Image (spheres, grey):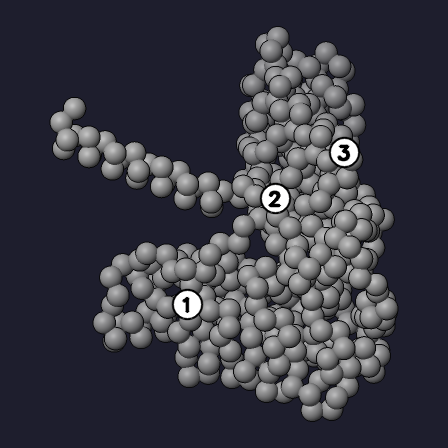
Amino acid sequence: MRPFNLLVVLTAVALVTAACSSEEALTPGAATPTVSSSATPSTRPTPQRTAVPTAPKPNAKKQAALDEQLIAAAWKNDLRRARTLIDQGADVNAKDNTVQSAYLISTSEGYLELLNLTLRHGADIDSKDSFNGTGLIRAADRGHADIAGRLIQANIKINHINNLGWTALHEAIILGNGSRRYVDTVLVLIAGGADLRLPSQRDQISPLDHATAKRHNEIAKMLEIALDADKPSKQVANRRLLAAARRGDATAAALAVRAGANLETRDPRGRTPLLLAVTEDRLAVARLLVDLGANPDAFDDQHDTPWLVTGVTGSVDMLEVLLPAGPDLKIRNRFGGTSLIPASERGHVAYVRRVVRTDIEINHVNNLGWTALLEAVILGDGSRRYQQIVSTLLDAGADPKIADRQGVTALQHAEQRGQRAVARILRDA
Protein backbone atom coordinates (compact mmCIF):
# COMPACT_ATOMS: atom_id res chain seq x y z
CA MET A 1 0.00 0.00 0.00
CA ARG A 2 1.32 3.42 -0.88
CA PRO A 3 2.15 5.74 2.04
CA PHE A 4 -0.60 8.22 1.09
CA ASN A 5 -3.26 5.51 1.13
CA LEU A 6 -1.98 4.16 4.43
CA LEU A 7 -2.28 7.61 5.97
CA VAL A 8 -5.87 7.94 4.76
CA VAL A 9 -6.84 4.55 6.17
CA LEU A 10 -5.22 5.24 9.55
CA THR A 11 -6.93 8.63 9.78
CA ALA A 12 -10.32 7.09 8.97
CA VAL A 13 -9.85 4.39 11.60
CA ALA A 14 -8.94 7.01 14.19
CA LEU A 15 -12.03 9.06 13.38
CA VAL A 16 -14.34 6.05 13.60
CA THR A 17 -12.78 5.00 16.91
CA ALA A 18 -13.23 8.50 18.34
CA ALA A 19 -16.84 8.61 17.21
CA CYS A 20 -17.60 5.25 18.81
CA SER A 21 -15.97 6.31 22.08
CA SER A 22 -18.02 9.49 22.10
CA GLU A 23 -21.19 7.54 21.44
CA GLU A 24 -20.48 5.15 24.29
CA ALA A 25 -19.81 8.02 26.67
CA LEU A 26 -23.22 9.52 25.94
CA THR A 27 -25.17 6.26 26.10
CA PRO A 28 -27.52 6.18 29.13
CA GLY A 29 -26.70 3.32 31.46
CA ALA A 30 -23.11 3.00 30.24
CA ALA A 31 -21.89 3.26 33.82
CA THR A 32 -23.44 2.23 37.11
CA PRO A 33 -24.99 5.37 38.62
CA THR A 34 -24.38 6.22 42.25
CA VAL A 35 -25.32 8.89 44.74
CA SER A 36 -22.32 10.38 46.46
CA SER A 37 -21.98 10.97 50.16
CA SER A 38 -22.29 14.68 49.45
CA ALA A 39 -25.94 13.86 48.64
CA THR A 40 -25.94 14.97 45.04
CA PRO A 41 -28.17 12.35 43.38
CA SER A 42 -27.15 11.03 40.00
CA THR A 43 -28.44 8.13 37.97
CA ARG A 44 -28.28 8.28 34.22
CA PRO A 45 -25.49 10.46 32.85
CA THR A 46 -26.43 14.14 33.04
CA PRO A 47 -26.17 15.94 29.69
CA GLN A 48 -23.15 18.20 29.74
CA ARG A 49 -23.98 21.87 29.83
CA THR A 50 -21.93 22.77 26.80
CA ALA A 51 -23.34 24.75 23.93
CA VAL A 52 -24.54 22.71 20.98
CA PRO A 53 -23.05 23.90 17.67
CA THR A 54 -25.45 26.30 16.00
CA ALA A 55 -25.49 28.80 13.16
CA PRO A 56 -22.79 31.49 12.95
CA LYS A 57 -23.11 34.09 15.71
CA PRO A 58 -25.48 36.87 14.63
CA ASN A 59 -24.63 40.56 14.88
CA ALA A 60 -25.52 42.49 18.03
CA LYS A 61 -28.87 43.77 16.76
CA LYS A 62 -30.03 40.39 15.53
CA GLN A 63 -28.72 38.75 18.70
CA ALA A 64 -30.82 41.06 20.86
CA ALA A 65 -33.90 40.32 18.76
CA LEU A 66 -33.36 36.56 18.97
CA ASP A 67 -32.84 36.72 22.72
CA GLU A 68 -36.00 38.77 23.20
CA GLN A 69 -38.01 36.31 21.11
CA LEU A 70 -36.59 33.36 23.04
CA ILE A 71 -37.64 34.88 26.35
CA ALA A 72 -41.15 35.42 24.95
CA ALA A 73 -41.25 31.80 23.75
CA ALA A 74 -40.06 30.62 27.16
CA TRP A 75 -42.92 32.35 28.95
CA LYS A 76 -45.32 30.53 26.62
CA ASN A 77 -43.45 27.24 27.02
CA ASP A 78 -43.30 27.13 23.22
CA LEU A 79 -40.67 24.42 22.83
CA ARG A 80 -40.75 24.28 19.05
CA ARG A 81 -40.23 28.02 18.77
CA ALA A 82 -37.54 27.96 21.45
CA ARG A 83 -35.59 25.23 19.62
CA THR A 84 -35.73 27.18 16.36
CA LEU A 85 -34.52 30.37 18.01
CA ILE A 86 -31.70 28.58 19.83
CA ASP A 87 -30.61 26.98 16.56
CA GLN A 88 -30.50 30.47 15.08
CA GLY A 89 -28.22 31.66 17.86
CA ALA A 90 -30.50 32.83 20.70
CA ASP A 91 -28.79 32.71 24.10
CA VAL A 92 -30.58 30.72 26.83
CA ASN A 93 -28.78 32.82 29.46
CA ALA A 94 -29.64 36.24 28.00
CA LYS A 95 -31.70 38.33 30.44
CA ASP A 96 -34.25 41.07 29.85
CA ASN A 97 -34.66 44.23 31.91
CA THR A 98 -36.50 42.25 34.60
CA VAL A 99 -33.51 39.88 34.95
CA GLN A 100 -35.36 36.97 33.36
CA SER A 101 -33.79 34.48 30.97
CA ALA A 102 -35.19 31.44 29.18
CA TYR A 103 -33.36 29.25 31.68
CA LEU A 104 -34.62 31.12 34.76
CA ILE A 105 -38.17 31.20 33.40
CA SER A 106 -38.16 27.42 33.00
CA THR A 107 -37.26 27.01 36.68
CA SER A 108 -39.93 29.29 38.12
CA GLU A 109 -42.71 28.20 35.76
CA GLY A 110 -42.04 24.48 36.12
CA TYR A 111 -41.29 23.82 32.45
CA LEU A 112 -39.18 20.66 32.71
CA GLU A 113 -38.71 20.07 28.97
CA LEU A 114 -37.71 23.69 28.51
CA LEU A 115 -35.27 23.40 31.40
CA ASN A 116 -33.68 20.34 29.82
CA LEU A 117 -33.47 22.18 26.51
CA THR A 118 -31.67 25.13 28.10
CA LEU A 119 -29.30 22.83 29.99
CA ARG A 120 -28.38 21.09 26.75
CA HIS A 121 -27.58 24.47 25.25
CA GLY A 122 -25.29 25.81 27.92
CA ALA A 123 -27.62 27.15 30.62
CA ASP A 124 -25.65 28.67 33.50
CA ILE A 125 -27.06 27.02 36.62
CA ASP A 126 -25.33 29.69 38.72
CA SER A 127 -27.36 32.41 37.01
CA LYS A 128 -29.29 34.63 39.46
CA ASP A 129 -32.55 36.56 39.25
CA SER A 130 -33.31 40.04 40.57
CA PHE A 131 -33.44 38.68 44.14
CA ASN A 132 -30.02 37.06 43.69
CA GLY A 133 -31.87 33.76 43.68
CA THR A 134 -30.88 30.65 41.76
CA GLY A 135 -33.17 28.56 39.62
CA LEU A 136 -33.43 26.13 42.55
CA ILE A 137 -34.77 28.83 44.85
CA ARG A 138 -37.30 29.87 42.20
CA ALA A 139 -38.43 26.25 41.78
CA ALA A 140 -38.74 25.74 45.55
CA ASP A 141 -40.79 28.92 45.85
CA ARG A 142 -43.38 27.46 43.44
CA GLY A 143 -43.19 23.88 44.68
CA HIS A 144 -41.72 22.42 41.49
CA ALA A 145 -40.14 19.28 42.93
CA ASP A 146 -39.26 17.89 39.50
CA ILE A 147 -37.39 21.07 38.55
CA ALA A 148 -35.60 21.07 41.91
CA GLY A 149 -34.56 17.46 41.39
CA ARG A 150 -33.28 18.13 37.89
CA LEU A 151 -31.22 21.08 39.09
CA ILE A 152 -29.77 19.04 41.95
CA GLN A 153 -28.74 16.43 39.38
CA ALA A 154 -26.97 19.25 37.54
CA ASN A 155 -25.03 20.05 40.75
CA ILE A 156 -26.57 23.42 41.49
CA LYS A 157 -25.56 25.05 44.79
CA ILE A 158 -28.29 23.79 47.07
CA ASN A 159 -27.65 26.13 50.02
CA HIS A 160 -27.27 29.42 48.14
CA ILE A 161 -28.77 32.35 50.06
CA ASN A 162 -30.69 35.07 48.20
CA ASN A 163 -31.19 38.75 49.06
CA LEU A 164 -34.00 37.86 51.44
CA GLY A 165 -31.64 35.66 53.44
CA TRP A 166 -33.36 32.47 52.29
CA THR A 167 -32.20 29.22 50.76
CA ALA A 168 -34.36 26.99 48.58
CA LEU A 169 -35.47 25.09 51.69
CA HIS A 170 -36.57 28.31 53.39
CA GLU A 171 -38.56 29.37 50.32
CA ALA A 172 -40.35 26.04 50.06
CA ILE A 173 -41.44 26.35 53.69
CA ILE A 174 -42.00 30.09 54.13
CA LEU A 175 -43.67 30.76 50.78
CA GLY A 176 -45.22 27.32 50.35
CA ASN A 177 -48.62 26.23 51.60
CA GLY A 178 -47.63 22.82 52.93
CA SER A 179 -49.45 20.97 50.16
CA ARG A 180 -48.19 17.80 48.50
CA ARG A 181 -46.11 19.65 45.93
CA TYR A 182 -44.23 21.48 48.68
CA VAL A 183 -43.85 18.29 50.71
CA ASP A 184 -42.34 16.67 47.62
CA THR A 185 -40.04 19.65 47.09
CA VAL A 186 -38.78 19.53 50.67
CA LEU A 187 -38.18 15.78 50.31
CA VAL A 188 -36.08 16.42 47.21
CA LEU A 189 -34.09 19.10 49.05
CA ILE A 190 -33.53 16.81 52.03
CA ALA A 191 -32.34 14.04 49.72
CA GLY A 192 -30.12 16.50 47.86
CA GLY A 193 -28.26 17.55 50.98
CA ALA A 194 -29.89 20.85 51.97
CA ASP A 195 -28.63 22.31 55.26
CA LEU A 196 -31.52 21.54 57.61
CA ARG A 197 -30.15 23.65 60.47
CA LEU A 198 -29.25 26.82 58.58
CA PRO A 199 -31.58 29.61 59.81
CA SER A 200 -33.05 32.30 57.61
CA GLN A 201 -30.53 35.11 57.82
CA ARG A 202 -32.66 38.09 58.82
CA ASP A 203 -34.53 36.51 61.72
CA GLN A 204 -32.31 33.50 62.52
CA ILE A 205 -35.30 31.13 62.51
CA SER A 206 -34.60 27.49 61.62
CA PRO A 207 -36.44 25.61 58.85
CA LEU A 208 -38.16 23.42 61.46
CA ASP A 209 -39.38 26.44 63.43
CA HIS A 210 -40.64 28.06 60.22
CA ALA A 211 -42.55 24.89 59.33
CA THR A 212 -44.01 24.68 62.83
CA ALA A 213 -45.06 28.34 62.80
CA LYS A 214 -46.69 27.92 59.39
CA ARG A 215 -48.46 24.76 60.62
CA HIS A 216 -46.93 22.73 57.83
CA ASN A 217 -47.24 19.67 60.03
CA GLU A 218 -46.10 17.05 57.52
CA ILE A 219 -43.02 19.06 56.60
CA ALA A 220 -42.25 19.73 60.25
CA LYS A 221 -42.47 16.02 61.02
CA MET A 222 -40.13 15.19 58.14
CA LEU A 223 -37.61 17.74 59.35
CA GLU A 224 -37.76 16.40 62.91
CA ILE A 225 -37.04 12.90 61.66
CA ALA A 226 -34.25 14.14 59.39
CA LEU A 227 -32.59 16.15 62.16
CA ASP A 228 -32.51 13.08 64.41
CA ALA A 229 -31.28 10.70 61.69
CA ASP A 230 -28.01 8.83 61.99
CA LYS A 231 -25.32 8.64 59.32
CA PRO A 232 -25.25 5.06 58.02
CA SER A 233 -22.70 3.51 55.73
CA LYS A 234 -23.49 3.44 52.03
CA GLN A 235 -24.27 -0.28 52.22
CA VAL A 236 -26.77 0.30 55.00
CA ALA A 237 -28.20 3.30 53.15
CA ASN A 238 -28.79 1.12 50.10
CA ARG A 239 -30.70 -1.43 52.17
CA ARG A 240 -32.73 1.30 53.80
CA LEU A 241 -33.64 2.79 50.44
CA LEU A 242 -34.93 -0.55 49.17
CA ALA A 243 -36.93 -1.10 52.36
CA ALA A 244 -38.34 2.44 52.30
CA ALA A 245 -39.40 2.07 48.67
CA ARG A 246 -41.18 -1.20 49.42
CA ARG A 247 -43.15 0.13 52.39
CA GLY A 248 -43.73 3.61 50.95
CA ASP A 249 -41.79 5.71 53.45
CA ALA A 250 -40.75 8.74 51.42
CA THR A 251 -38.93 10.44 54.31
CA ALA A 252 -36.81 7.35 54.95
CA ALA A 253 -36.11 7.11 51.23
CA ALA A 254 -34.97 10.73 51.12
CA LEU A 255 -32.69 10.20 54.11
CA ALA A 256 -31.19 7.09 52.55
CA VAL A 257 -30.35 9.05 49.41
CA ARG A 258 -28.98 11.87 51.54
CA ALA A 259 -26.71 9.31 53.20
CA GLY A 260 -25.32 8.20 49.85
CA ALA A 261 -27.63 5.41 48.67
CA ASN A 262 -27.45 4.47 45.01
CA LEU A 263 -30.74 5.15 43.23
CA GLU A 264 -30.16 2.04 41.14
CA THR A 265 -29.22 -0.31 43.96
CA ARG A 266 -30.77 -3.78 43.61
CA ASP A 267 -32.46 -6.29 45.86
CA PRO A 268 -31.73 -10.04 45.46
CA ARG A 269 -34.21 -10.20 42.57
CA GLY A 270 -32.55 -7.34 40.75
CA ARG A 271 -35.32 -4.85 41.54
CA THR A 272 -34.43 -1.18 41.95
CA PRO A 273 -36.07 1.08 44.55
CA LEU A 274 -38.23 2.62 41.82
CA LEU A 275 -39.41 -0.79 40.62
CA LEU A 276 -40.34 -1.75 44.19
CA ALA A 277 -42.21 1.53 44.66
CA VAL A 278 -44.11 1.01 41.40
CA THR A 279 -44.94 -2.61 42.22
CA GLU A 280 -46.39 -1.60 45.60
CA ASP A 281 -47.95 1.59 44.13
CA ARG A 282 -45.98 3.82 46.51
CA LEU A 283 -46.58 7.12 44.77
CA ALA A 284 -44.72 9.47 47.13
CA VAL A 285 -41.53 7.41 46.98
CA ALA A 286 -41.84 7.00 43.22
CA ARG A 287 -42.23 10.77 42.76
CA LEU A 288 -39.12 11.38 44.85
CA LEU A 289 -37.04 8.83 42.95
CA VAL A 290 -38.19 10.09 39.55
CA ASP A 291 -37.47 13.69 40.56
CA LEU A 292 -33.95 12.63 41.50
CA GLY A 293 -33.39 10.86 38.18
CA ALA A 294 -34.16 7.18 38.81
CA ASN A 295 -34.28 5.02 35.68
CA PRO A 296 -37.82 3.95 34.63
CA ASP A 297 -36.37 1.33 32.26
CA ALA A 298 -34.15 -0.66 34.65
CA PHE A 299 -34.77 -4.41 34.18
CA ASP A 300 -34.97 -6.89 37.04
CA ASP A 301 -34.25 -10.61 36.81
CA GLN A 302 -37.77 -11.21 35.43
CA HIS A 303 -37.22 -8.68 32.64
CA ASP A 304 -39.65 -6.24 34.23
CA THR A 305 -39.06 -2.51 34.49
CA PRO A 306 -40.82 0.20 36.48
CA TRP A 307 -42.65 1.30 33.34
CA LEU A 308 -43.66 -2.21 32.29
CA VAL A 309 -45.04 -2.93 35.75
CA THR A 310 -47.52 -0.06 35.45
CA GLY A 311 -49.26 -2.09 32.74
CA VAL A 312 -49.57 -5.00 35.17
CA THR A 313 -50.83 -2.95 38.12
CA GLY A 314 -52.93 -0.66 35.96
CA SER A 315 -52.09 2.36 38.10
CA VAL A 316 -52.79 5.50 36.10
CA ASP A 317 -51.41 7.66 38.90
CA MET A 318 -48.11 5.79 38.71
CA LEU A 319 -48.12 6.05 34.94
CA GLU A 320 -48.36 9.83 35.32
CA VAL A 321 -45.46 9.80 37.78
CA LEU A 322 -43.21 7.89 35.38
CA LEU A 323 -44.05 9.64 32.11
CA PRO A 324 -41.94 12.75 32.89
CA ALA A 325 -38.96 10.41 33.32
CA GLY A 326 -39.18 9.58 29.62
CA PRO A 327 -39.69 5.80 29.78
CA ASP A 328 -39.08 3.77 26.64
CA LEU A 329 -42.61 3.00 25.46
CA LYS A 330 -41.26 0.32 23.10
CA ILE A 331 -39.56 -1.62 25.87
CA ARG A 332 -40.75 -5.24 26.09
CA ASN A 333 -41.38 -7.66 28.91
CA ARG A 334 -40.30 -11.29 28.95
CA PHE A 335 -43.27 -12.17 26.75
CA GLY A 336 -42.26 -9.57 24.18
CA GLY A 337 -45.13 -7.25 25.07
CA THR A 338 -45.35 -3.54 25.79
CA SER A 339 -47.16 -2.23 28.87
CA LEU A 340 -50.39 -1.91 26.85
CA ILE A 341 -50.71 -5.67 26.34
CA PRO A 342 -50.86 -6.86 30.00
CA ALA A 343 -53.10 -3.89 30.78
CA SER A 344 -55.53 -5.01 28.07
CA GLU A 345 -55.34 -8.61 29.23
CA ARG A 346 -56.08 -7.68 32.85
CA GLY A 347 -58.96 -5.35 32.08
CA HIS A 348 -57.34 -2.10 33.27
CA VAL A 349 -59.74 0.22 31.45
CA ALA A 350 -58.48 3.56 32.81
CA TYR A 351 -54.87 2.63 32.13
CA VAL A 352 -55.59 1.58 28.55
CA ARG A 353 -57.50 4.80 27.93
CA ARG A 354 -54.56 6.83 29.20
CA VAL A 355 -51.67 4.92 27.66
CA VAL A 356 -53.14 4.92 24.13
CA ARG A 357 -52.82 8.71 24.24
CA THR A 358 -49.04 8.32 24.39
CA ASP A 359 -46.83 7.20 21.52
CA ILE A 360 -47.11 3.54 22.48
CA GLU A 361 -47.52 1.14 19.54
CA ILE A 362 -51.15 0.00 19.45
CA ASN A 363 -50.63 -2.95 17.11
CA HIS A 364 -47.44 -4.36 18.59
CA VAL A 365 -47.33 -8.17 18.40
CA ASN A 366 -45.80 -10.07 21.33
CA ASN A 367 -43.94 -13.39 21.38
CA LEU A 368 -47.23 -15.29 21.45
CA GLY A 369 -48.32 -13.60 18.25
CA TRP A 370 -50.94 -11.49 19.99
CA THR A 371 -51.69 -7.76 19.94
CA ALA A 372 -53.34 -5.91 22.82
CA LEU A 373 -56.67 -6.34 21.01
CA LEU A 374 -56.20 -10.09 20.66
CA GLU A 375 -55.20 -10.39 24.34
CA ALA A 376 -58.27 -8.46 25.46
CA VAL A 377 -60.46 -10.98 23.63
CA ILE A 378 -58.53 -14.22 24.12
CA LEU A 379 -57.73 -13.68 27.82
CA GLY A 380 -60.69 -11.44 28.64
CA ASP A 381 -64.18 -12.56 29.62
CA GLY A 382 -66.23 -10.31 27.35
CA SER A 383 -67.56 -8.30 30.30
CA ARG A 384 -68.22 -4.57 30.28
CA ARG A 385 -64.64 -3.61 31.06
CA TYR A 386 -63.28 -5.70 28.19
CA GLN A 387 -65.86 -4.22 25.87
CA GLN A 388 -64.60 -0.79 26.88
CA ILE A 389 -61.00 -1.83 26.28
CA VAL A 390 -61.80 -3.25 22.84
CA SER A 391 -63.62 -0.03 21.89
CA THR A 392 -60.75 2.09 23.23
CA LEU A 393 -58.14 0.11 21.29
CA LEU A 394 -60.17 0.30 18.07
CA ASP A 395 -60.65 4.06 18.48
CA ALA A 396 -56.89 4.40 19.00
CA GLY A 397 -56.11 2.59 15.74
CA ALA A 398 -55.99 -1.10 16.65
CA ASP A 399 -56.25 -3.21 13.50
CA PRO A 400 -58.99 -5.87 13.92
CA LYS A 401 -57.72 -7.72 10.84
CA ILE A 402 -54.46 -8.76 12.53
CA ALA A 403 -54.78 -12.50 13.23
CA ASP A 404 -52.90 -14.75 15.61
CA ARG A 405 -50.39 -17.34 14.43
CA GLN A 406 -53.20 -19.72 13.55
CA GLY A 407 -54.84 -17.08 11.38
CA VAL A 408 -57.71 -16.44 13.81
CA THR A 409 -58.80 -12.79 14.16
CA ALA A 410 -60.09 -11.05 17.28
CA LEU A 411 -63.65 -11.23 15.91
CA GLN A 412 -63.40 -14.96 15.34
CA HIS A 413 -62.02 -15.46 18.85
CA ALA A 414 -64.88 -13.42 20.29
CA GLU A 415 -67.44 -15.47 18.38
CA GLN A 416 -65.82 -18.75 19.47
CA ARG A 417 -65.92 -17.64 23.11
CA GLY A 418 -69.49 -16.42 23.01
CA GLN A 419 -68.48 -12.81 23.64
CA ARG A 420 -71.42 -11.41 21.71
CA ALA A 421 -71.06 -7.77 22.77
CA VAL A 422 -67.36 -7.77 21.95
CA ALA A 423 -68.04 -9.46 18.61
CA ARG A 424 -70.63 -6.80 17.78
CA ILE A 425 -68.09 -4.03 18.54
CA LEU A 426 -65.53 -5.71 16.30
CA ARG A 427 -68.01 -6.20 13.45
CA ASP A 428 -68.87 -2.49 13.55
CA ALA A 429 -65.20 -1.45 13.49
Q: Residue at x 73, y 80 (%)?
A: 198
Which numbered marker is on residue 32? 2
Locate the N terminus by quadrant.
top left
Q: Distance between the residues labelled 3 and 1?
A: 44 Å
Provide the secondary structure element on which disc 2 rests: loop
Quarter of the view holding residue 315 = top right
Q: Residues within 10 Å of mark 2 (few under 14, many from 20)?
A: some
- Using the image as rendered, state which of residue 409 and residue 82 is in the foreground: 82
- Using the image as rendered, state which of residue 5 and residue 202 is in the foreground: 5
- Using the image as rendered, state which of residue 61 and residue 44 is in the foreground: 44
* Residue 406 higher or lower than 399, as above or below: above
Count the marks. Answer: 3
The amino acid at mark 2 is Thr
- Using the image as rendered, state which of residue 239 and residue 293 is in the foreground: 239
Along the horizontal axis of the image, is 250 left or right of 69? right
Locate the C terminus by quadrant.
top right
* Residue 28 higher or lower than 419, as above or below: below
Which numbered marker is on residue 44? none
Q: How far apart are marks 2 and 1 (CA)?
A: 31 Å
Provide the secondary structure element on which disc 3 rests: loop
